[in-house]
Image (cartoon, grey):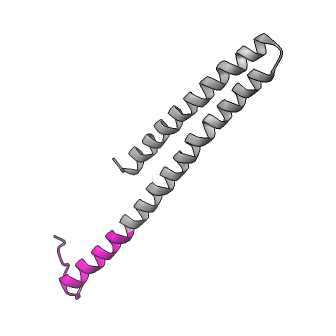
Amino acid sequence: MPQQSSSDPRPLAEILDEMAVAHLRQAAESDRDKWKDFGRTALECVLWPCIGIACIGWALHTTDLAYGKAAFYAGIAIGNGGVIFSLLAAYRRGEARGDW
């Protein structure tokens, strides 16, 4: 419980109310930041597979076997690796924010 200094003539209830309002405002900002980050991560988790599918699609349409194999495996790596990277980055950002 906060100690009331002799220079602050306000009643303790008023000080506690101000602290509660400040805490609620900080909690709302924290929730907003968390949900923005979740949305960003969800978009990234959709974007990476789309890029991977585009690479695989190009691999299916190319006539050179070496380029086709390279594009196919690159598409697999980009699609799966991008999602894993996005999720791990989101976890790291959440740790830095103190979400979990």
Residue shown at 32% from the left, 76% from the top: 21
- Left or right placement of residue 31 versus residue 17 in this view: right
Residue at image location 52% in from the left, 52% down from the top: 39
Is 69 left or right of 35, judged from the image as shown?
Answer: right
| Quarter of the view holding residue 46 | top right
19 and 51: which is toward the camera: 51
At which x and y percent is residue 50? 65, 37
Q: Please name the residue shown 28% across and 74% down the image.
A: 20
Q: Residue furthest front?
A: 60
Instruction: Name the residue: 18% across, 82% down.
Output: 12
Q: Is residue 5 magenta?
A: yes
Q: Is residue 2 above or below residue 59?
A: below
Give the image quarter of residue 19: bottom left
Q: Which residues are magenta?
A: 3-25
Q: Is residue 32 above or below residue 80?
A: below
Residue pushed farthest right? 63
Residue 56, quarter of the rendered image: top right
Q: Between residues 13 and 46, which one lies in front from this camera angle?
A: 46
Figure disc tally: 0
Based on the picture, tell me whether residue 37 belongs to the magenta stretch. Answer: no
Tell whether 9 sits left or right of 90: left
* Image quarter (top left, top right, bottom left or bottom right) of the N terminus: bottom left
- Answer above or below: position of 59 versus 25: above
Residue 42 place in picture, x, y as percent: 53, 46
x, y percentage for residue 40?
55, 50
Instruction: Give how far across and how far down residue 81 sits, in percent.
Output: 56, 28
Q: Main secondary structure of the magenta part?
A: helix
